[in-house]
Image (cartoon, helix red, strand yellow):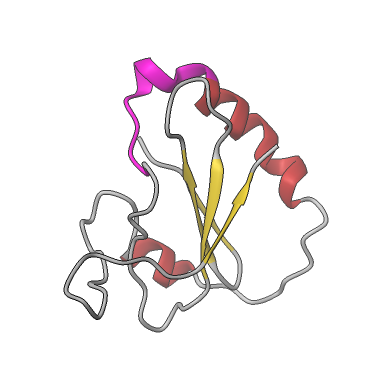
Amino acid sequence: MGIATYDSAVHFYSLRSPTAQPQMLVMSDTQDVFAPNSGKLLMELEQHRDALKALLEALPEMWAANRVNDNCAGAAIEVGPGTGRERPSRSGQRGTRGGQRSWR
């Protein structure tokens, strides 16, 4: 299972372990969108059930003050977790772009 939100950017949520706090990975380039690979975007539901539930319950409050009117739903759908579309870095290795921040 994977979770993403969007406004003018696509926000992926990564859980490195069942007890870790989720991290938000922000993909602001929606013209050349790809899935970041610096975090675990797909999680086993049974293993991460409590953390995923807590994240889903917290999302409305996290975004309640968001006043961004832009919408990149198409980009979010195009790169949804599990599509396997990752952007190669210049050295030929898979790379990431965008920001990263912890969720609380």
Q: Residue at x 42, y 34 (%)?
A: 16
Instruction: Identify the image quadrant of the N terminus.
Output: top left
Q: How many marks?
A: 0
Residue lying at the far front of the rendered structure:
91
At which x and y percent is residue 97? 43, 70
Give residue 32's quadrant in the image.
bottom left
Asked whether, in this view, residue 24 is left or right of residue 32, the answer is right
**Magenta highlight on residue 44:** yes
Magenta stretch: give its range. Answer: 41-50
- Using the image as rendered, state which of residue 13 and residue 74 is in the foreground: 13
Q: Residue at x 83, y 56 (%)?
A: 65
Asked whether, in this view, residue 69 is left or right of residue 77, the answer is right
- Using the image as rendered, state which of residue 82 and residue 16 is in the foreground: 16
Residue lying at the far left of the rendered structure:
92
At which x and y percent is residue 104? 70, 37
At which x and y percent is residue 96? 37, 66
Q: Residue at x 52, y 20 (%)?
A: 19
At which x and y percent is residue 53? 55, 24
Give residue 67's quadrant in the image.
bottom right
Above or below 68: residue 31: below
- Using the image as rendered, state which of residue 19 and residue 9 is in the foreground: 19
**Magenta highlight on residue 83:** no
Q: Residue at x 56, y 50 (%)?
A: 24
Magenta region's main secondary structure?
A: helix
